[in-house]
Image (cartoon, rainbow, N blue to C red):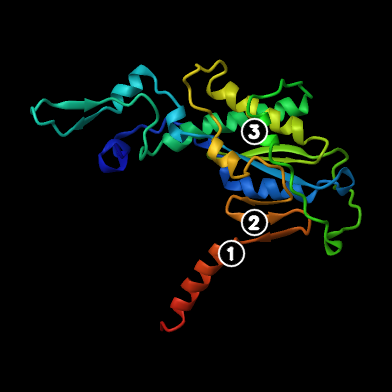
């Protein structure tokens, strides 16, 4: 059920905490972390972890399930049917806010674990991810900057999130602990003791595509970031689409 097609949005009371949606400045925070990482600690690495199933990870309270119930067209026997959602639905105005309350919490837990140097056991997904070696580009001489008083005095370790996309920033000595912090914090937030039949919380298909692999070049929030030559570019397919749109404007008055 797409809740944009009924009146639930017009009649919902704004109880969700809108400040939970902090992704408006996610790219700025990520670029800030990359810019001030000290090169003496090695190449600056990035990795991504996508939460599978999105909104369907967030259960509703029993009272909320009835508030969001919908009447569906009857079957062939003309018996009326009521659909009662058990998880956050698509199309409801406040689904993103409640969802971000969970994902932002997972990112906070990961950063707290990193700051406190909490030891994490090896996550079950570690072997799958480490089967893809880290990819590092050679450092461009033109990207070298003089030492700055603003540069970090320790290796980079940082976790951010945009909706359901977790982004890890690290350097070689902190890559493993940053990875573990992200994976375990996602588990703790969404189900600390999963049932054997539960689907993986992190998308395995995205990991198989190399998202979880540490690399100096990675597409982050739609931008192609290269930490070796300190560049921020649009991916080629977006450049092509943008050129097509711009050329379509040229003959117009």
Q: Residue at x 68, y 59 (%)?
A: 232
Residue under label 2: 224
Answer with mark 3 or mark 2, whichever residue precedes in sequence. 3
For mark 3, give the secondary structure: helix
Rendered position, 58 above or below 137: above
Distance between the alpha carbons at the discs numbered 3 and 2: 24 Å
Q: How many marks?
A: 3
Q: Are marks 3 and 2 in contact (CB under 8 Å)?
A: no
Residue under label 1: 236
Residue under label 3: 128
Which sits in the foreground, 166 or 21?
A: 166
Q: Which quadrant holds the C terminus?
A: bottom left
Most extreme residue toward the front is 131
Judge the density around disc 2: few (<14), some (14-19), many (≥20) Cα neighbours within 10 Å: some
| Image coordinates for residue 101, horizontal then vertical, percent | 53, 31
For mark 2, give the secondary structure: strand
Q: Is residue 112 left or right of residue 3?
A: right
Picture quarter containing residue 238? bottom right
């Amino acid at each position: 059920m797409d809740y944009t097609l009924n009146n639930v949005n017009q009649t919902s009371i704004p109880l969700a905490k809108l400040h939970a949606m902090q992704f408006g400045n996610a790219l700025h925070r990520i670029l800030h972390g990359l810019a001030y990482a000290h090169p003496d600690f090695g190449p600056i690495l990035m990795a991504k972890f996508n939460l599978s199933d999105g909104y369907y990870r967030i259960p509703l309270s029993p009272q909320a399930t009835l508030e969001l119930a919908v009447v569906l067209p009857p079957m062939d026997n003309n018996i009326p049917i009521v659909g009662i959602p058990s998880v956050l639905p698509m199309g409801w105005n406040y689904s993103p806010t409640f969802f971000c309350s969970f994902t932002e919490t997972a990112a906070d837990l990961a950063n707290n674990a990193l700051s406190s140097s909490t030891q994490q056991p090896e996550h079950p997904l570690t072997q799958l991810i480490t089967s893809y070696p880290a990819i590092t580009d050679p450092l461009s001489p033109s990207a070298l900057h003089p030492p700055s008083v603003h540069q970090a005095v320790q290796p980079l370790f940082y976790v951010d999130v945009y909706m359901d996309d977790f982004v890890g920033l690290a350097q070689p000595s902190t890559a493993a602990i940053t990875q573990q912090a992200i994976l375990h914090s996602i588990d703790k937030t969404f189900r600390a003791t999963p049932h054997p039949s539960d689907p993986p919380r992190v998308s395995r298909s995205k990991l198989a595509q190399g998202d979880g692999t540490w690399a100096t070049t990675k597409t982050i929030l739609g931008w192609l970031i290269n930490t070796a030559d300190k560049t921020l570019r649009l991916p080629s397919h977006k450049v092509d689409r943008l050129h097509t749109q711009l050329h379509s404007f040229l003959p117009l008055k």
